[in-house]
């Protein structure tokens, strides 16, 4: 394969659209959770008291981490590099695995923790399939 001419554009990496869709859904969720952590904790984080110093620190750190994950996810969508998108997907897989465990472990009394943890399974499966596609594309 010949290198592209000077005025030719390098084609964008092509992975299935569902990987972009997954990333966009996760960006929407992270945006909502970040908004909630910063300005309306009662929407999602009812157990944390934002008026207490400890609660405010936890919510601020959570929002900061979400913003960092959102930034990396946006960069992966813009620059279309399989390795970068694979890193985003791997980060998501790790985050959702931990969240599933925490949903099970800290389920409110009377709520089925195992059922809450199972709600993460579709995301985990999608991430595993996405990683397979992206790693294969990165190797090519």
Image: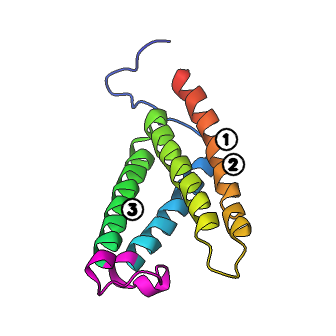
Disc marking residue 125: 2
- Asked whether disc 2 touches disc 1, contact meaning CB atoms under 8 Å apart, the reply is yes
Residue in view at x 53 percent, y 60 percent: 26
Label located before the other in sequence (2 or 3): 3
From the top left corner, tell me how far across and down residue 40 is, in percent: 39, 85
> From mark 2 to mark 3, how far is it between C-alphas?
21 Å
Q: Left or right? Give the position of 27 relative to 35.
A: right
Q: Which residues are magenta?
A: 37-55
Q: Left or right? Give the position of 107 relative to 112.
A: left
Q: Left or right? Give the position of 70 relative to 15.
A: left
Residue in view at x 38 percent, y 28 percent: 8
> From mark 1 to mark 3, how far is it between C-alphas?
23 Å
Asked which secondary structure carries label 3, the reply is helix
Residue in view at x 39 percent, y 62 percent: 66
Residue 63 higher or lower than 133, as above or below: below
Residue closest to the far top: 1
From the top left corner, tell me how far across and down residue 6 is, in percent: 31, 23
* Mark 2 surroundings: few (<14), some (14-19) or many (≥20) residues within 10 A: few
User: Which of 15 and 124 lies nearest the eye of the viewer?
Assistant: 124
Asked which secondary structure carries label 1, the reply is helix
From the top left corner, tell me how far across and down residue 120 is, in percent: 65, 60
Which residue carries the number 3 mark?
Answer: 66
Q: Nearer the viewer, mark 1 or mark 3?
A: 3
* Mark 1 surroundings: few (<14), some (14-19) or many (≥20) residues within 10 A: few
Which residue carries the number 1 mark?
Answer: 129
């Amino acid at each position: 394969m010949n290198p592209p001419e000077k005025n030719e554009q390098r084609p964008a990496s092509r992975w299935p659209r569902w990987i972009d869709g997954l990333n966009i859904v996760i960006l929407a969720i992270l945006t909502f959770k970040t908004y909630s952590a910063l300005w309306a904790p009662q929407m999602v984080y009812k157990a944390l008291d934002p008026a207490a110093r400890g609660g405010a620190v936890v919510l601020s750190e959570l929002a900061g981490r979400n913003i960092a994950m959102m930034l990396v996810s946006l960069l992966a969508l813009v620059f279309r590099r399989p390795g970068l998108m694979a890193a985003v997907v791997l980060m998501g897989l790790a985050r959702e695995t931990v969240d599933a465990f925490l949903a099970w472990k800290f389920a409110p009394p009377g709520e089925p923790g195992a059922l809450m943890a199972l709600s993460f399974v579709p995301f985990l499966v999608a991430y595993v399939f996405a990683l397979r596609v992206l790693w294969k594309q990165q190797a090519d």
